Amino acid sequence: MKIFEPHIHMFSRVTDDYERMALAGVRVVLEPAFWIGQPRTNVGAFVDYFDTLVGWERFRASQFGIHHVCTMALNPREANDDRVNADVLAVLPRYLEKDGVVGVGEIGLDDQTPTEERFFLAQLDLAKAHGLPILIHTPHRNKRRGFERIIDLIRDAKFPWPHVLLDHGNEETIPLTRDLGCVSGFSIYPNTKMDVHRMVAVIREYGVERIVVNSAADWGISDPLMIPKLVQALLRAGFPDATVEQLVWKNPIAFFAQSGRLDLAALDRPPTASRRETHDGNTILRGQDPDRS
Amino acid sequence: MKPVPPALAALERALAGPEEAWIRERLDLDPAAARAALPVVFPALARRAGRAGLSGRIVVGGAHVDLGAWRRCDAVGTLLLHAADPVDDATLVDLFLRGDLEERTILLRAASVRPLGAATSRFLDEVQRTNVGAHLEAACLDHDLLVRALDGGLLSRDRFDRLVLKAAFNDLPLARMEGVRERPGAELTRMLLDLATEREAAGRPVWRDTLRLAGGAPVAGTVARVLGALEHGDATTRLAGAEALLALRRKDLAAYAAERLPREHRPDVRAALERAAAL
Ligand SMILES: [Zn+2]
């Protein structure tokens, strides 16, 4: 089963994770820009992080045969920090044009402050200007209230619902979001929040239409193999292959392809950065040491 | 569109294709507007202009470039810089440092046909520290940028040696580093032989071109390695050994070529051995 993991912070993961994910069928990872576990104190730290997402991390993934795409944003947590918020907003337009940036995110609300709302709305405008869908981080505390507020803000901004992915949902929030026409994201964690069994139950009740699932793995206790594990659970529960494939491959592709920047044919083969490696049949490594490739 | 020097006409021919209107619109900007647009146009080049391959060779202002390694986005990026000229070094460096993998590749390919400058030097410094294979290839292969930078004084001999060593460490082929074989150096030989020793200690293959460079500037230990290579089980290594033996131009070693000859069956290796035996 080919898997598109639509929310994972590889920045904080080790190479073993890439190797295991590749073996378990993960072909594409989407890394949303978020905070990095501690506050950044100047815009330069964001710029370096953004460069990592479009540069080094992409290269690292490609070495394991995995395509890496990302979304760029000022995250809601650091939107509250006046040392960085305005400056980060100012550098975003350049980064939103980068190859491999397929959305604006994670934006949304965390502590649900007025400042968060201000930067959320500013980034909705950026998403419109660059023709990108948005990936929304919803609060882990006071979740239902946060969902409702985010929905109101998007509605008032007249942002198109098909370009919205409301992430970190659960059984509580799905009734709020089903009729909006947006995509609902579910993050599956080892211990807390949504787990595999609850997720199977959600799919049984709501189907897979406009639903995506992710591990949201980062530097906390989380599992980059959560989606492969969910795939196994769904197949064991009797869901047809085609249904599972829609959930873990076609749905995230359909959503992020709205950026116009997903090369669908390229996603079907492993990434490479060198034309001669693939196109001439004349690899630079021919006859050389293959394990340095 | 600003006229393009005849040497770059091959790049201009690559403009026909997808998104041509979008590309030409940006090439038609006056230089100041083109310069201002570079930071937002460059990121979009790979996906808009695409990665279709070019072919042929060009000579531009003394630079020799094999377009076989170029993609359409490299050609468009180079023409955009031409349209934006004069682009100062600070702008080029900013584009590079804030560029993604593709933007950096495009800038490195463009550097191989653009005049040498402080930005070229900075790019090569960045490449010296990179692990990204595509950037190493774009900086070192399929053109003579490295030797032009050495001959033109932009790269010191030490920096040149360290770049070649890095290319060797990553197993890039010497045959595609244009002119490098003609710039051997004793310190480079020493570093390459040390690398060979390390690789052997680890039970790993040695860079195939080691002896081709070592033969031109031998240091202690070179002769023994060259003679040993004549008996290597891998024909490419034997060829490098025979060529190195020839490059050493030592009459006293001709007997070793003669001794190997009757047992050598590869025509290319034999040809080199015959010349070495006749010294
Ligand atoms: Zn996240």
Image (spheres, coloured by chain):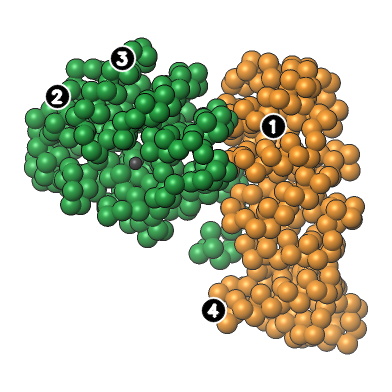
Describe the element under mark 3 as helix, strand or loop: helix
Q: Are marks 2 and 1 on the same chain?
A: no
- Chain displayed in green: A
What is the C-alpha distance between the residues marked 2 and 4? 62 Å
Ligand 1 sits in quadrant: top left
Q: Which amino acid does label 3 sit on?
A: Arg
The x and y percentages for residue A196 are 15, 45
What is the C-alpha distance between the residues marked 1 and 3? 40 Å
Q: Between label 3 and label 2, give the one nearer the viewer.
A: 3
Return the residue at label 2: A175
Query: Could you say which is closer to the camera, residue B41 or residue A244?
Result: B41
What is the C-alpha distance between the residues marked 3 and 4? 64 Å
Is residue B49 something that shows in the picture? yes
Left or right of residue A26, residue B152 in this image: right
Return the residue at label 1: B77
Return the disc, 1 or 4, that comes first in the chain's sequence. Answer: 1
Q: Is residue B233 above or below residue A248?
A: below
Residue B203 - label: 4
Q: Which amino acid does label 2 sit on?
A: Pro
Q: Between label 3 and label 4, give the one nearer the viewer.
A: 3
The x and y percentages for residue A69 are 44, 38
